[in-house]
Amino acid sequence: MNERNVLDDLRRDVAGLEETAIVEVALHGWDRAGIIPLWFGEGDKPTPAFIADAAIEALKRGETFYTDQRGIQPLRDSLVRYTKRTFGIDVSTDEVTLVTAGMSALYLAMDMLIEPGDEVVVVGPVWPNIYSTVHVHGGVVRDASIRLTDDGWTLDLDQVFAAVTDKTKAIFVNSPGNPTGWMMEAEEQARLMTFARERGVWVVADEVYHQLVFDRDVAPSFLQVARRDDRLLVVNSFSKSWRMTGWRLGWLTHPAALAPVIAKLVQITTSGVPQFLQRAAIAALEDGDPVIAEIKAECKRGRDLVFDRLEAWPRVRAARPKAAFYAFFAVDGVTDSTAFAKEIIDRANVGLAPGAAFGDAGEGYMRLCFAATEATLIEGLNRLEPILGSGTDQRHSA
Ligand SMILES: Cc1ncc(COP(=O)(O)O)c(C=O)c1O
């Protein structure tokens, strides 16, 4: 009988995967009665009925077979039309692939690009799964963080360029960003794309929040500054703009030459998205603009409601974001955001995500998702006020 622990048999990068601090905090408060959960990146309303109906009808029609690995033709036609309508960009159906949500698109991107030891320059603070996806492929993260200044969150592009070495395979940018709501402007994207082109480095652009923008119609996309043959992968998702987090639907925009490679990778992982879900995706793309408009308006209201309160609290430092649906704020006196998030659960029964989960640059910050309904946000803020709403909180030990 072999006494070795089964975990010792795992690939080192897999065994070394860490639980994110968001999950650690959520496990602390998950089963508390009456908790107000503002820790995850989703709203509290279900998917609109017309989208669900499209899936139900397809199921009843018997659309239950294997399909094209990269999505059925009508779905990819819809993605092409959506890209044109949204960003004014012509792509072909060879350049878009439907995948099992944005997360799967990120995983596929790193699967294609990263060999052990390759470096990825990541503009942080950013969603922890990005770091984990690089690590599980044996990649090394080099951080180039945005900073909170009097002008809001700002990126020093020269810092990004300086982080690129001979080992750099890709630069990762999430704009609009989770957790900060920072948005990269078109001129910055153009400079970065030019730099990447000259250096032969890939740009992986996570644009899953492109519709949730409050000062213009849509966020600038790397697609708008790229050439067709550029080393660019754009990650997208149905989760945020159409209330479809649980459906696990997303898409990748990529050079046409990668289409057969992606098809093979999809084949040996998910083998494609169920066809009835693809019908729902088509319904969202073709008829979902009013849903997007509604979510956008709700998020803007949520943002203003939350920031009107946060900005009046002396312990809190924050910048009202132009995009996405998060408040990412520094709390005076907090040096261990994970412990503080647990303390907030114990004292206020509100679930917030700790800033430490988003990389070193996030320590000392907390993230609150303001995509929730107004009554929930008001109650959550009322409960937080005794802790965050006065000067230094005497009870907090950190
Ligand atoms: C920055 C970012 N990228 C990608 C995703 C993945 O979204 P999904 O896998 O639900 O499409 C998320 C979800 O929170 C996110 O915040």
Image (tube, rainbow, N blue to C red):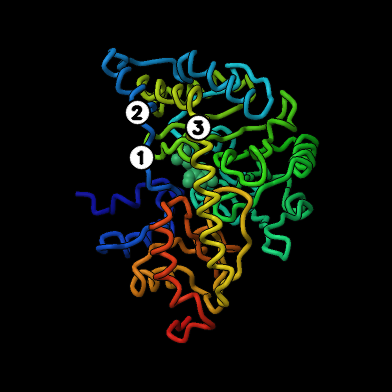
Residue annotated with mark 1: 46
Residue 326, horizontal then vertical, whole percent: 53, 54
Query: Could you say whether the residue bearing mark 1 is in a helix, strand or loop?
Result: loop
Q: Residue at x 38, y 58 (%)?
A: 376
Viewer-nearest of discs 2 and 3: 3
Residue 398 coordinates in the image, percent (x, y): 48, 80
Tell me the quarter of the picture where residue 374 sits: bottom left
Relative to 78, is 139 above or below?
below
Nearest the viewer among 286 and 297 is: 297
Rendered residue at 42%/47% (across/down): 43
Residue 386: % across, % down: 43, 77
Q: Front-most of 349 and 295?
A: 295
Disc 3: residue Cβ within 8 A of ligand 1's nearest atom:
no
In the image, is residue 107 above or below residue 12?
above
Residue at the far left in the pictured view = 1
| Tag 2 near tag 3, CB within 8 Å | no
SS for callout 2: helix
- Give the residue pinned by disc 3: 290
* Residue 52: mark: 2
